[in-house]
Amino acid sequence: MPFAQTGALWRGRLTVLAGLVILGLNLRAAVTTVAPVLTRIREEVALSPTAESLIATAPPLMFAVFGALAPLWGRLWGLERVIAGAMALAAGATAARAATGSELVFLIATGLIMAGLGTANVAVPPLIKRYFPDRVGLMTTASTVFLVVGQALPPAFAVPVADRLGWRWAVGLWAVGSALAALPWVVQPYRQSRRRRRAGQARPARKGGRGARVVRSKTFWGITGLLVCNTVAAYALMGWLPQIMIDAGAPPRQGALWLTWFTAGSLAGALVVPVLTVRLRRPWILVVIMFAGWTIGLAGLMLWPLRGTWLWIALTRLGDGNYACAVTLMNLRTRSPKTLLAVSGFGQAVGYSVAALATFAFGQIHAATGSWSWPLTLLICTMPLGLLGGLVACRRGFVEDQAG
């Protein structure tokens, strides 16, 4: 493509592109930074077992609550301003969490961090549809790739940074990234307003939506089922994988490295799955393959955690491509950004609600039984439900047509 055409393609969208990249890098950083250094935090903050389960549960729980509120806030104030405020909240709470010695403050700060990230998380698919309707597959790929990179970096650096500077630095450094992620979304509304003034256009009125109607759509529930199953398994392992490996006999540093492999391993699916979902006439084939990966990988971690670990984790990462598939299907099965915001908000709210309960139960079942086999078995049993949802979501049709 000639340079002039390339420049025209991105003109007026570079700030949004930069915003999506920086946002993606920071949407999961605060989620994966605590688990590798949890033992050290426990020594200084005196976290109880219940508090540790709440910390693991906080990401999906707050993503659910504030993901459900994000569509309303987006209609009232605009997606860009909502993201800016959400990431500013996450930055301040991350700094507070790193500075405190109180269990209560640590838990409240964790909740506020996840509230900010959960709000921003829901806004990404509608922003892609609004600014890049001609590049949905490409931009979903790019956004998911940077999200995966942002998940993988904290576990890789947490233990070395904690060894040198202490766990507070390992946890608190990511406040800078959250603050930077807010900046493009402060600039973008100003740029839009300036362009409208130059063109002599009035500011468009913010219209209310009837997003609740999406619950009448079977496609919506199919996408939601796909998200629920994938999110439950992903957040359960994200919160507990290092401890599973340590309890099996691995040293703490190796447990952190396995979490890095777990988070970074999603990169391959993030690169390939959105494009394949757009281009394949039968994307359900992808869903079947990915759920097979989840099932075999979880069974391997349960039966032989220290033998073939890289393979079991790799298979779960193949399965985690279902997240990128679900986000892409949100774009493909809706006609307007307003409907997409409702699907993203309500769908992710349901998914993260179930994941929150499952993640808490995962730790509590282990505490009651003294074994990781029971909670891992329950995760395996959820896979057929997610597969059914994925098959429904892959059938052609639009949410608007089904919702009425």
Image (cartoon, rainbow, N blue to C red):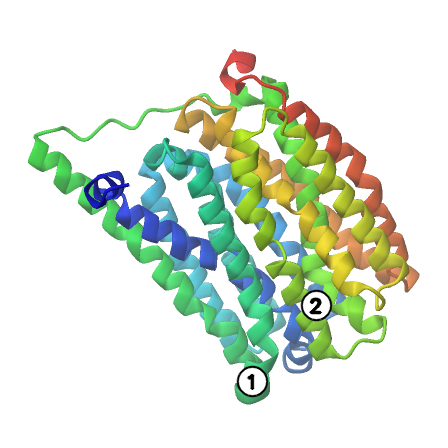
Is residue 60 toward the left or the right of residue 359 in the image? Answer: left
Numbered circle sitting on residue 166: 1
In terms of depth relative to the viewer, which is nearer, 197 or 18? 18
Indicate which disc, 2 or 1, sits on the residue closer to the N terminus.
1
The residue depicted at 54 percent of the width and 22 percent of the height is 214
Residue 141 visible to an observer of this rendering: yes
The residue depicted at 83 percent of the width and 59 percent of the height is 301
Q: Secondary structure at mark 2?
A: helix
Count numbered badges in the picture: 2
Which quarter of the figure has residue 380?
top right
Residue 50 visible to an observer of this rendering: no
What is the C-alpha distance between the residues marked 2 and 1?
A: 21 Å
Is residue 35 toward the left or the right of residue 295 in the image? Answer: left
Amino acid carrying label 1: it is: Gly
Extreme residue in the bottom direction: 164
| Position of 187 relative to 285 (above/below) | below
Pointer 2: residues within 10 angstroms few (<14), some, or many (20+)?
Answer: many
Quadrant location of the N terminus in the rendered image = top left
Which residue matches tag 2? 258
Comparing marks 2 and 1, which lies closer to the viewer? 2
Task: Please provide percent x and percent y for residue 321.
Answer: 63, 44
Task: Please provide percent x and percent y for residue 2.
Answer: 23, 42
Amino acid carrying label 2: it is: Trp
Is residue 31 toward the left or the right of residue 318 in the image? Answer: left
Pointer 1: residues within 10 angstroms few (<14), some, or many (20+)?
Answer: some
The residue depicted at 77 percent of the width and 59 percent of the height is 311
Which quarter of the figure has residue 75?
top left
In terms of depth relative to the viewer, which is nearer, 219 or 115? 219
